[in-house]
Amino acid sequence: FSRRRERAARGLGAGGAMEFRLEAHRIVSISLGKIYSARGQRGGLKLHKNLLVSLVLRSARRVYLGEPGGECALPPRPGPPPPPDCERLRRGCRPLASEAAARGRPECPAESPRKRSAAERDPAAGYPGKKPRRETEQPPPQEDMETGNVASLISIFGSGFSGLLGKERGAAEATEPGQVCCEQPVLRSLNPWSTAIVAF
Amino acid sequence: ETPKPPAAAAVCGGGGSDPVPAGASPWWAPQPPAPHTLRDMAGVAGGGGGGGGGNDFQWCFSQVKGAIDEDVAEADIISTVEFNYSGDLLATGDKGGRVVIFQREQENKSRPHSRGEYNVYSTFQSHEPEFDYLKSLEIEEKINKIRWLPQQNAAHFLLSTNDKTIKLWKISERDKRAEGYNLKDEDGRLRDPFRITALRVPILKPMDLMVEASPRRIFANAHTYHINSISVNSDHETYLSADDLRINLWHLEITDRSFNIVDIKPANMEELTEVITAAEFHPHHCNVFVYSSSKGTIRLCDMRSSALCDRHSKFFEEPEDPSSRSFFSEIISSISDVKFSHSGRYMMTRDYLSVKVWDLNMENRPVETYQVHEYLRSKLCSLYENDCIFDKFECCWNGSDSAIMTGSYNNFFRLFDRNTRRDITLEASRESSKPRAILKPRKVCTGGKRKKDEISVDSLDFNKKILHTAWHPTDNIIAVAATNNLYIFQDKIN
């Protein structure tokens, strides 16, 4: 076991924020791998396990992207910044991101504002079944870390997901009618939450 | 001269020895030791069911069942263990869909050492793999749970379930057969009626004991998600089955309908934040049941309040400790098992690192918390990576509710004495499997210099996990499932 890694996961250790993001990056990769490999499992998708993996993925993604609410995954650090509304986050609402709040959109309970914003960027993305394969978009420039690996990882799993969903469309719809998530797999617009759950 | 253990409390109407009798000192005050505590009887094993179960007993190896091979066949992995109400029968289910029932030997003067030994009584294939063509999914035959029905006649009944289908099995003995039929020969061939000139009365003749298992009811097609629990009601007529999102109520006689009593499926699956992880009926109140969630909460429901018990009567949750928060806080708070005490006054929950005892009258925090393997808290990231963090450990009470037991890794299992607050770690291994050998307590070294006989956290074998354990309802006999082997340990006095 790597002690440094483990302490980073607990939010301790020298290097602080950098270690968090490294750890978050690693956890995002591991989580996506688990969601991806879960589809081949005998006995069908295990809802409980995949829900837990989605929760971890969501927390890690928030920390990795430096989103508000990312601190909820970590023990509180002494200092001035006010704690985010962890209760809201735990109930499944999105944190009140400034852009969405500015638009005055409701943030609870579904992630619909996020989908809409992706659709605005790309009108074709919102239509299930009509999305053509596209190249990976450039990751947003404010990433100060080497994001190429993660972005391409996401796009592999992302396109793998929609490709798989396309193949198993009939099966998926027979179980749970739900919107098939066909967004362009840019890290920010990837909604692991709905992707994992709607996959059921 | 060693005292005999006191008789266990009756299942209905009476309580076990209750460490917090009503009207005594408040729950937060240290409890005086219960009568017959083993501190008073130092060195004498077996204060009986009333005294406590932890390390004051001398736990001895009794038997081990299963293959010795290092190579474990997946189908042989034991997935559930359950004693019946009298403790004379011990059932196991495995990943291959088979049920094996062991029976305790009666006292026999000619074979004194075999008294109390469990031997195979019946083996049958309960579930087979199925294929759901609509969803293109295979349905595993693994037995998730077995629950015995209380015995009402000579036959024994149990419920066994896989992910989708529950079956009621009747296990009956046949030790006589009829001979001398009129219309058929001894080998079963029909006789020509015109040849029969005289009539005779068939007589019963003894035969070698045969134990037959037959499926009497099949309860199917009621669960979209994977069944995790079944629980027989104290009315002995109904039972519940729970999957990730729903709980159904069945009548044992009726297979074509069930009542849905809990449904937590959101209208929009994207809003899903928690699932049901376990459910159980109250041992005495047939209208009360509890279910636990992946968020570490327990809801107690009363079926008299409404047909659909979506609104709980009680909600049990312990506030989170912010200083121990991590990426994995939510996963490790998910409850993997919930069990009422025999008295019905308490319930116990198991999450990844601890066991908690709750007083049904207090919703805001448990009355007792026992750390099972706290040294794993700093390893959660690695345990997430190798999937061990998703392991679902079960827990159980002893007959008098004075002790609890649960499993861990490296084939370790832990027993906690609620009265003395002492705990012990034991190991289920072939090495310590000499007949009637006393088990040596084990210890995990959590830091610093490793003492002799201690094992360091990094040396633990995470593939050897004890998820399923059972405690005899009245005696100090425990059954521990270690992958494909079933270990039976007894207190020395037995």
Image (spheres, coloured by chain):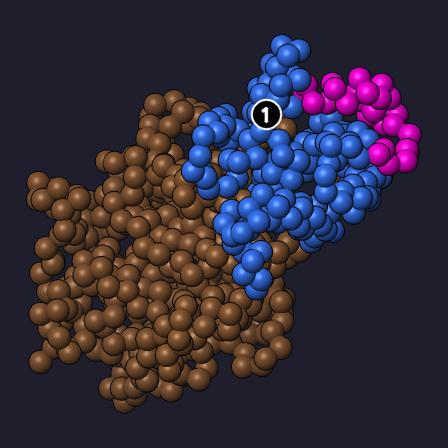
Chain colours: A blue, B brown
The quadrant of the picture occupied by the N terminus of chain B is bottom left
Residue under label 1: A94
Q: Which residues are magenta?
A: A112-138
For the question of whether residue B181 can be seen, the reply is: no
Label 1 is found on which chain of the structure?
A: A
- What SS does tag 1 mark? loop
The quadrant of the picture occupied by the C terminus of chain B is bottom left
| Outermost residue to the bottom | B110
Return the x and y of residue B321 as percentages of the image width and height.
38, 41
Q: Residue A5 appears in which quarter of the rendering? A: bottom right
Q: For residue B267: magenta?
A: no
- Of B447 and B200, nearer the camera is B447
Hey, what amino acid is under mark 1?
Arg
Note whether B185 is above or below B403 in the view shown. below
Q: Residue at x 50, y 50 (%)?
A: A12
Return the x and y of residue A45 as percentages of the image width and height.
66, 45
Return the x and y of residue B239 as percentages of the image width and height.
42, 42
For the question of whether residue A102 can be seen, the reply is: yes
- Of B313 and B7, nearer the camera is B313
| Outermost residue to the top | A104
Q: Residue at x 40, y 71 (%)?
A: B448
Q: Residue at x 13, y 75 (%)?
A: B42
